[in-house]
Image: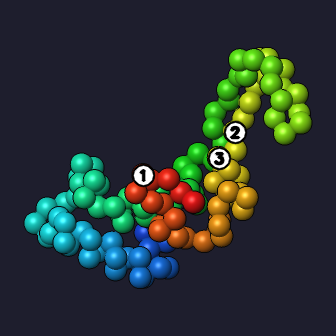
Amino acid sequence: MNAMEWAVSLLLNHPEELKKAQKEIDNSIGHSRLIVESDLTKLPHLSKIINETLRLYPPVPLVGPHESSDECTVQGFRIPRGTTLLVNCWAIQNDPKVWVDPRQFKPERFGKGGKGT
């Protein structure tokens, strides 16, 4: 499933968020044209919905391989220089130590700067 399908599914399962988005679009854009990317600055709630959808359902749950440039320690584990690293975006974006109710759809968790809490 792609991000657009996830967003539609989430909105259908959260009609109050869909109504907020519809009202925002009607008030800011109207019915005379389609939304374009530059409109997102005028649509903060829609931007929050997009961010929350991508947090819950990242298009790529694992970031492509990276290589450590220096030796370091991560949570007590020694990582030698040149180690291939795979970052699990899904795990980070659903970590209950970072996100309150991580499996819940809550667009409001994204504030003005787009940062989630």
Q: Give the alpha-carbon distance from disc 1 to disc 3, as whole Å.
A: 20 Å
Q: Residue at x 43, y 64 (%)?
A: 49
Would residue 76 appear left or right of 114 to someone viewing this image?
right
Q: Nearer the viewer, residue 45 or 55?
A: 45
- Tell me the mark number nearer the camera, choosing from 1 and 3: 1
Can you give x and y, in whole percent of width and height, for residue 24 in the image?
26, 71
**What residue did someone put label 3 on?**
89
Q: Which of pointers 2 and 1 lies earlier in the amino acid sequence?
A: 2
Residue reaching furthest front? Answer: 112
Disc 2 residue type? Val
Q: Residue at x 68, y 50 (%)?
A: 92
Q: Nearer the viewer, residue 73 or 27?
A: 73
Would residue 97 appear left or right of 103 to someone viewing this image?
right
Residue 82 vs 73, above or below: the answer is above
Residue 99 position by quadrant:
bottom right
**What residue did someone put label 1 on?**
113
Q: Residue at x 71, y 17 (%)?
A: 69
- For disc 2, the neighbor class at 10 Å (few under 14, some 14 to 19, many from 20) is few
Disc 3 residue type? Cys
Residue 94 numbered mark, or none: none
Would residue 18 appear left or right of 2 to someone viewing this image?
left
In which quadrant is the C terminus drawn?
bottom right
Residue 2 visible somewhere in the drawing: no
Residue 99 visible somewhere in the drawing: yes
Q: Are marks 2 and 3 in contact (CB under 8 Å)?
A: yes
Q: Residue at x 19, y 66 (%)?
A: 28
Q: Give the alpha-carbon distance from disc 2 to disc 3, as whole Å.
A: 6 Å
Residue reaching furthest left? Answer: 32
**What residue did someone put label 2 on?**
87
